[in-house]
Image (cartoon, rainbow, N blue to C red):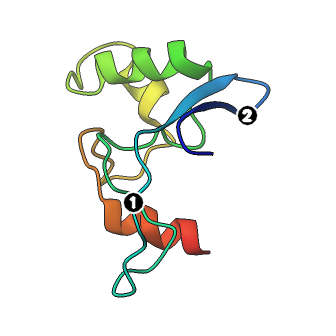
Amino acid sequence: MTHGHLQYRYDLGDAWDHLVRLEKVTPSDPRLRYPRCTDGARAAPPEHVAGGVHGYTALLSVLPHPDHPDHPHLTEYLDADFDPNHFSATAIDAELRD
């Protein structure tokens, strides 16, 4: 594949649809390990968010508001240090290699 995209569905029940875009192909660099993530943004949704995209959107809307009536229910399965704005290509690279 030299260009294009592929669609990927994670979790058939909640239908997390992803579009993976191949932007360019470059010569391999023997100093780097592959596969590798070159860019991204934000944290992946937590594994136990119910309701797919809509459930995650609801979680994001109440997360900064601990007094919101839905906050306890929507955040009960989150790790204490969950940060939706965190992104780490290094951590993703480690998962890709597992």
Q: Element type at marker 1?
A: loop
Write down the residue under mark 2.
11
Q: Residue at x 33, y 52 (%)?
A: 80
Tell which of 68 and 62 is nearer to you: 62
Between disc 2 and disc 1, the foreground one is 1
Residue 40 x %, y %:
32, 44
Estimate the x, y position of residue 86 in percent, counting from the top left: 25, 48
Q: Residue 65: horizontal and vertical position, in percent?
A: 21, 21
Q: Is residue 79 left or right of residue 7?
A: left
Residue 41 horizontal/vertical position (percent): 29, 40
Q: Is residue 19 left or right of residue 13?
A: left
Which three-letter amino acid code belongs to the residue tagged 2? Asp
Name the image quarter holding residue 70.
top left
State which tag comes first along the sequence, 2 or 1.
2
Q: Residues within 10 Å of mark 1 (few under 14, many from 20)?
A: few
Amino acid type at image mark 1: Thr
